[in-house]
Structures are given as structure tokens and as C-alpha cells.
Image: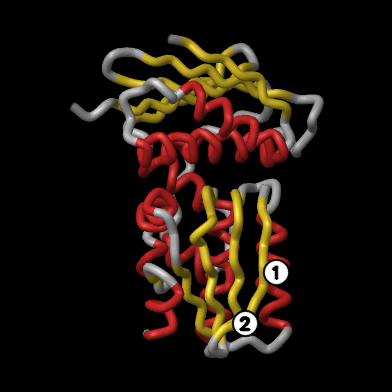
Amino acid sequence: MLRLEKTKEKQNDILSLFGEVDASNSVILDEAIQEIIASGAKSILIDGQNLEYISSAGLGVFMSYLEDFQEQAISMKICGLTPRVYEVFRILGLDQLIPIYQDRAAAFAD
Amino acid sequence: MKHILNISCQTSALSDLRAFLQQALGSSLLTEIEKHQVTLAVEEVCANLIIHSHGCNPQDSIQLEVKDSAEKLIFEISDQGEAFNILDYEVPDLKKVMIEKRKGGLGIILVKKIMDEIEFESKNGTNTCRLIKWFRS
């Protein structure tokens, strides 16, 4: 089960993830990011404090945007990951490609 | 201890798989983070089979058997679809995945990094992928 919530804070488009992302629902995450880009967002913050689980299907969604975001000068940050979800990003090396912060305040401060 | 689950080949079955593993791993010697990781690795192999070998056909099924001993956990995933030998699959470079905007390939990186041993055999129409995790003492 995955629920998404889009909000804005300090000129950032925030996408909060609730629940689990797997191969059955990663397309919902993909569509939400596409909508945020289409609205002209330049600074996207993924809030993962309520993300309980993410498989490669969801991680692949983030990966697939990295190059485009670099070219279009769109920033994407992730914050609030629980230790076990953060560990998955780290095993894959995604922590080297996407800036990951403790919480929203730390992400805004950088 | 032995736990067995039959999984229908549809991605909506993946959450049932996670619930089953959570129960099967409940009394194991793994840490919470390790339980989370082996669950992910088993799911990645099953998701690959469901999507690529069985084309998400809910009439097909795959079997998962979890065997727990004093020193290791064995996850045996069997199916009768097109054989996919994870050991033959070269682990892609992460940067390459990014440049090519490929959404696949990441799962296999995770399985190979999380599990201690991977075995594969195909016999009499049944493919078996065995994932092994040793307990750290």
C-alpha cells in the first residue's frame, strides 16, 4: 500500500511517501514525479519519514530522473528515511547520487 | 523450521510475500535491518520471475520455501517458467543504469550484495534459485 502527498514548503515541492513502494505501485510514484516536473518545479524534496519499504522498482524511478534533472538544473533531495530504508539506498550506492538528509530542516538548510 | 508459500504470478502478491517473510523470519537470528534486507532480496528475485518469466500471468505460480538452521537461512524459489539464471546476469554499473535510464537491473545488484551465496539449477522443467544468508556470530 502506497499513499503520496504533494505539498509546498519554502519554494520546494515536497512529495511525502507513506507505506511501501514495490513493483505493483512504483508507477504511481513515477506519475507523481512527472506531475511535479510538469508543474515547473525546480526543487523537489522527497520526504521518506513514513516510507516503510522500497524495492528496486521504486529506487529505479528515482534513478531514471537523475540525468534529466542534472541537465534541467532541477534539484532532488530525499529526507527522513528510517535507518532500514536508508540502508537499502546505501547498499545500492544511491546515497552517492542523491543527497539524503536527516529531516526537512537539514534539507532546506543545504 | 520450514515455511512454504505459493505465490500467484502477479505483482499484487508481493505484499503477501513480505508478510509471509516477516512471520517466517520472526524468530531468526538476523537483526531487524538484516531481516528487511533479505526480505527485499527474496522479493526482487520473485518480482523478476513474476514480471519477466511469467508475464504477470496470475494462473502461474512460484514456490518459496524458507529453511532455517542453526547457522544459516536458505530461501528456495522454484518455478516452471522460462529459466532466468541470476548467476549469468552481469551486475550493471550503477552509473550506466542512470545514463541509460534503465529501471531494471537494480534488483539484481541488491540480491548479490545482500545474500552470501546464490545457487541456481534447472532440472526437469523446474528452475530453482537458492539464496543463502549466514548468521553472523
Secondary structure type for disc 2: strand
Secondary structure type for disc 1: helix
**Alpha-carbon neighbours of circle 1 within 10 Å: few (<14), some, or many (≥20)?**
some
A99 or A47, nearer to the observer: A47
Front position among marks 2 and 1: 2
- Residue at 56 percent across and 59 percent down: it is A60
- Residue at 61 percent across and 19 percent down: it is B5
- Residue at 68 percent across and 78 percent down: it is A36
Q: Residue furthest left?
A: B137
Query: Hey, which quadrant is residue B81 in on the image?
Result: top right
Q: Position of residue B83 (x, y in %)?
A: 61, 29
Q: Is residue B111 above or below residue A106?
A: above
Q: Position of residue A53 (x, y in %)?
A: 53, 48
Residue type marked 2: Lys
Q: Is residue B113 above or below residue B39?
A: below
Q: Position of residue B48 (x, y in %)?
A: 61, 40
Q: Which mark is residue B24?
A: none
Q: Earlier in the sequence, mark 2 or mark 1?
A: 2
On what subunit does the disc labeled 2 rest?
Answer: A
Q: Which residue is mark 1?
A: A32
Residue type marked 1: Ala
On what subunit does the disc labeled 1 rest?
Answer: A
A6 or B6, nearer to the observer: A6
Asked whether, in this view, residue A74 is left or right of residue A87, the answer is right
In three-dimensional space, the C-alpha distance between marks 2 and 1, rounded to whole angstroms, equals 14 Å
Q: Give the quadrant of the C terminus of chain B.
A: top left
Q: Position of residue B52 (x, y in %)?
A: 67, 40
Q: Which residue is mark 2?
A: A8
